[in-house]
Amino acid sequence: MPSAHPPTDARRPRLRDDPYAVRAVVALGLFSLAEHAVWVTVLVVAYQQGGVGEAGSVSAALLAPAALMAPIVAREMTAPGVRSPLATGYALQAITLALATGVLALDLDLVLFYLAGVLVTITTVFSRPAHHAFLALRGPTVAATVATGAVSGGAQLMGPLLAAALLTRWQVVHVFTLATALLLTATLLTIRLPAHRPLAAGSPLPPPAATSPAAAVLRHRPAGTRACVVLLFALLGLVAVVLGTIETLATEVSFANNDTGGSGTGVLLAATGGGLLLGAPLAGLVVRRANERAAMRLGSVIAGVALLAAGVSLGVAWSVVAFALVGVGMQTVLVSGWLLLHRHVCRSDTGVTGVVFGALESQQLVGNALGALGAGVAMGHVGIWPVLIVVAVGLPASMLALSRDRVRRLSPTATVIGSTATTPDPTPAAATAAATPAAAHTA
């Protein structure tokens, strides 16, 4: 007799059941750790040379070309002709890091170091889109996506601390040397990973590449999917803006509320990173028990309430908890959005998937910058509380637009609570059974 609660989708398999996904997640963790350590170090160098003005200018100069090139580069890096997109991206970043390390070791002009930094930042946009494309084309799975969010949050917490520890006892060149070694290790881990999803017996072939990325992504999707994708991108863009706001908010709270200065800012941002680490498993838990829509709404509420709490002057400990909860909520929304995008593009070719996540990478960079800038201007003119109230109310309210029907359009293979839609089991055994009449008759 068949089980009353058969597995309905790819949510139950564990990460360790897919060794390729394990290697991809570990490599992304090494990359993210190097990325955050290098970013902090570059800003420290800029600040030492010209103060906060030069640090801000360098930040903009590094991020702008990366944001512009992310969709284009991601599409080329994940095109069907590229055999090892993950390893290629990590190797290119290792090369640019080695170049920057050489500039530092030879004590060349600072302008050359900044130019090398631009190349390093541009190559960082190779990795995350290729990673998400790899996960999506192996079949949507919660475990690998949750692990991706966890290692990203952990790197945001540990990367700056690693840079601080190295800069305390050694020099900038040592940070870049270690980052290069981390990227070389990531390259070795991913050099033999397959670029395409292995198809189970009886599974239909993926659709061929279309004349345009948008047409290929929307092929075999219900009417109205384009609007749903735009909506999801808008929601994830709002998350990026809020995360950018957090950087300015941490500075304001540490100086104005807690009187802890720059060290307090670092502590609050580290607390946010810790929250990002914890938010990934929370997203996985809610998605397994309910769905992505519920997880995104819950995460937005947690973040909204925590933002209001962050503005209350009750001491450093209170602020640390509030900023950690903001990170938890933001990561819950972000990981759930990744899952919806994975399920949406899982039948598309790798080039199209790269475009989708390349555009998301660009959007995240621009959103972070706009959030930090907008929060600074707004807090300077109207104060902290109007900004917090607008963001804390607007974020959960925006998630109401993600209806059950829109989730079904975005994710035809996802389970939606309260719906009559069923989801096929994508495991090889289930696919084989579905393709074999005798097996179906026996069941």
Image (tube, grey):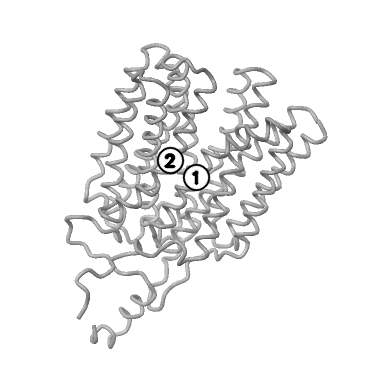
The image position of residue 32, as x and y in percent, is: 56, 44
Q: Would you name the residue on which mark 1 appears? A: 152
Relative to the observer, which residue lies in front, 268 or 79?
A: 268
Seen in the picture, residue 365 relative to 90 is either above or below; the reply is: above
Separation of marks 1 and 2 at Cα, in angstroms: 8 Å
- First in sequence, mark 1 or 2: give its number: 1
Q: Would you name the residue on which mark 2 appears? A: 276
Which quadrant does the C terminus fall into? bottom left
The image quarter in which residue 194 lies:
bottom right
- Residue at 75%, 31% in the rendered image: 112
* Tag 1–tag 2 contact (CB < 8 Å): yes
| Residue at the farthest right position | 106
Asked which secondary structure carries label 2, the reply is helix
The image position of residue 412, as x and y in percent, is: 29, 59
**Side (left or right) of 341 relative to 403:** right
| Amino acid at the residue labelled 2 | Leu
Relative to the observer, which residue lies in front, 127 or 209?
A: 127
Seen in the picture, residue 132 relative to 57 is either above or below; the reply is: below
- Residue at 40%, 17% in the rendered image: 378
The image quarter in which residue 138 lies:
bottom left
| Amino acid at the residue labelled 1 | Ser
- Residue at 73%, 44% in the rendered image: 98
The image position of residue 305, as x and y in percent, is: 29, 30
**Side (left or right) of 102 relative to 239:** right
Asked which secondary structure carries label 1, the reply is helix
Which quadrant does the N terminus fall into? bottom left
Relative to the observer, which residue lies in front, 427 or 163?
A: 163
Checking the image for residue 226, the label placed there is none
